[in-house]
Image: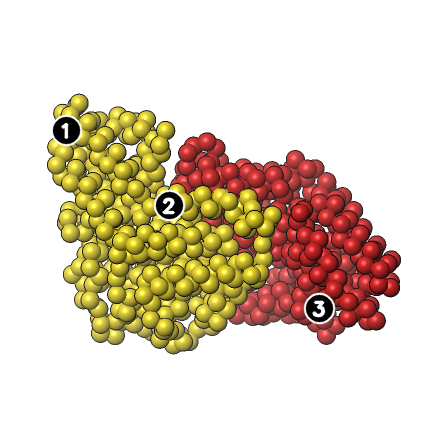
Chain colours: A yellow, B red
């Protein structure tokens, strides 16, 4: 049976990427060796990481004062690494609290400087993007989370800010074109749109670095990775390789503009059904904030007892990863770049059929 | 042609592990999904990490006051994370400088406390293990590097110490049985004996933690990983999976006692040839310190012009990764757990034939 993987992350990857990724483990380019066994200093991996860097630069249209870094530890490590590298103890950074991950970023940043949370939708269970914050004049940066996986909210347009933006872009990275120049730092765990779990990309603008007073351990210093081209020590070779394959796939499929068109179309199909179908409703209160990556919905109160049954029908039809986060409940369909429109349509068909049968 | 992968790391992995690892990327357990796409909170990965933990405990015979943690960032990250978690600024730690990696560990540790380098073989280009150090009475721990990949030296017996041992065991982890109880912390990048690059194991004894005054970011705090069973955030799923497969293979092949027997036999074949063959010599000055993992050798002075030719013959016979580190020169045969004796024998045969033809 055709499987439809709606998992929030680690998440669906393009089928041709997985095919090639499997081959590389068995026998890399006919060498008779697995990519897992090859030296990260050898010509094979050198070519891989150079291609990954070039594709990333091209797809994001990065100016030359931005560096592409391949790190480890997930976005959670960046929650501390970003302020550690950029914020002095007597300096202020502005944060917008749009969900659990933003909250964790705030918690870690407080160890390194003065943190001003300028807007939050916490009291409303993060059902919208709080846009009413004012960035203090002395803020060294403004930190935002571009997409909130748990709540299905997304910054449709990034906020204007006098301070450089720092953005946790983990869950919608590479899903749409955007102007990178207001960003001082972008970071993203690979395991949504980029690749498997195990590597984290940071896009750093040069002028963000070199102003902190504290001594930084080598592995927590962005400049180490800049100087050594992400090869100061053994990097996560295979996650970087699979990410490179995904970047290739993305380029071949129209780049960020092409994927945005597809992502918009897929999300529209699903949100239209949620709005049309009397049995379901979306959980995001401001429709302008609806995520194109994670579509969160529940059943209307009078049907809520049917949620379990519908979930079982989804499972019986090869659909997995559809349970909403426990703090939101209901359903969450994660429809990242690699999700085909046909899978979204299959879910929509089930929703329509179920409502017809039960309403 | 049969390939013989003598790479120092990322390094050879057992053939059956690679076969299963490739299958998991294509289609995990017949689910119709790749392991790379599956949630780290799902039943599949939960089973994987639980089995990995259980196998690690069993193979190392870990008492219950030791925790197994799956981290990221390589041993290089542990160079800072270990002292950050264990050493206060006014406290002293003893370090033994047995090579470049020990040296890096010392450099990072100096950011966190008083570091006493009690022995070093740096002046002799690290050609032996410096064993003449005295651990100061007030030392919070003694840090050693169990095996020095670059120089081909290894602690055959671990030093006695009044302070708990902290050991970077990256390049000989799981290659021999040992008593874990003198160790307060062991860490190892996976990419030698354990799995592919991308995960790092730490074995922490409970009493080592909880005494530092400094505030620790969540991702740099061992207790975060203890509390959350290495699942505070998305871990490097695939590297952990392949490591679990390798642990399974290790158990099936006689565990640490069984692998030690094989490792000793393999190393003996190669060192015997180096000592017997008039064309070659080992680079380690104290034979008791010779590594069973990385066998470093050069040509005798009168033959040194033939090194290039011999390397070409090795390559023509499917042997890769044999170049010695630039600071030692000559040859380095890394013969980790997964290296079959037949490959070592093939190299020895080439050495014998070459000497016969050229001497």
Disc 1 from disc 3: Cα separation? 75 Å
Kind of element beneath mark 3: loop
Give the chain letter at badge 2. A
Camera-side residue of B1 and B227: B1
- Nearer the observer: mark 1 or 3; the answer is 3
Residue where numbered disc 1 is placed:
A302
Mark in the foreground, 2 or 1: 2
**Residue at 31% across / 56% down in the picture?**
A255
Q: Secondary structure at mark 1?
A: helix
Circle 3 sits on which residue? B328
Image quadrant for the C terminus of chain B? bottom right
Q: How many marks?
A: 3
In this figure, which residue is indicated by the disc labeled 2? A14
Same chain assignment for discs 2 and 1: yes
The chain carrying label 3 is: B
Q: Residues within 10 Å of mark 3 (few under 14, many from 20)?
A: some
Looking at this view, is B317 or A349 the one in front?
B317
């Amino acid at each position: 049976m055709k499987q439809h993987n709606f998992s929030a992350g680690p998440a669906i990857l393009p089928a041709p990427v997985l095919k090639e990724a499997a081959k590389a483990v068995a026998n890399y380019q006919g060498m008779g060796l697995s990519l897992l066994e090859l030296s990260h200093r050898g010509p094979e991996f050198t070519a891989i990481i150079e291609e990954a860097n070039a594709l990333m630069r091209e797809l994001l249209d990065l100016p030359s004062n931005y560096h592409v870094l391949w790190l480890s530890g997930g976005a959670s490590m960046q929650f501390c690494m970003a302020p550690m590298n950029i914020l002095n103890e007597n300096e202020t950074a502005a944060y917008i609290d749009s969900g659990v991950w933003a909250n964790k970023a705030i918690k870690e940043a407080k160890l390194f400087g003065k943190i001003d949370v300028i807007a939050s939708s916490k009291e409303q269970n993060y059902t919208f993007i709080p846009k009413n914050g004012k960035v203090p004049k002395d803020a060294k940066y403004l930190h935002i989370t571009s997409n909130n996986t748990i709540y299905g909210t997304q910054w449709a347009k990034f906020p204007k800010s006098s301070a450089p933006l720092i953005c946790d872009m983990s869950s919608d990275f590479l899903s749409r074109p955007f102007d990178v120049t207001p960003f001082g730092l972008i970071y993203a765990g690979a395991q949504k749109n980029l690749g498997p779990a195990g590597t984290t990309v940071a896009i750093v603008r040069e002028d963000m670095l070199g102003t902190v007073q504290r001594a930084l351990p080598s592995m927590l210093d962005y400049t180490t990775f800049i100087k050594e081209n992400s090869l100061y020590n053994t990097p996560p070779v295979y996650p970087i390789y699979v990410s490179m394959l995904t970047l290739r796939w993305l380029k071949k499929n129209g780049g960020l503009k092409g994927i945005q068109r597809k992502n918009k179309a897929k999300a529209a199909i699903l949100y239209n059904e949620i709005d049309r179908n009397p049995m379901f409703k979306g959980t995001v209160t401001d429709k302008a904030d609806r995520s194109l990556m994670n579509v969160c919905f529940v059943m209307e109160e009078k049907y809520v007892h049917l949620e379990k049954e519908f979930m079982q029908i989804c499972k019986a039809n090869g659909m997995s990863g559809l349970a909403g986060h426990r703090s939101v409940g209901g359903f969450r369909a994660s429809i990242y770049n690699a999700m085909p429109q046909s899978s979204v349509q299959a879910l929509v068909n089930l929703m329509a059929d179920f409502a017809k049968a039960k309403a």
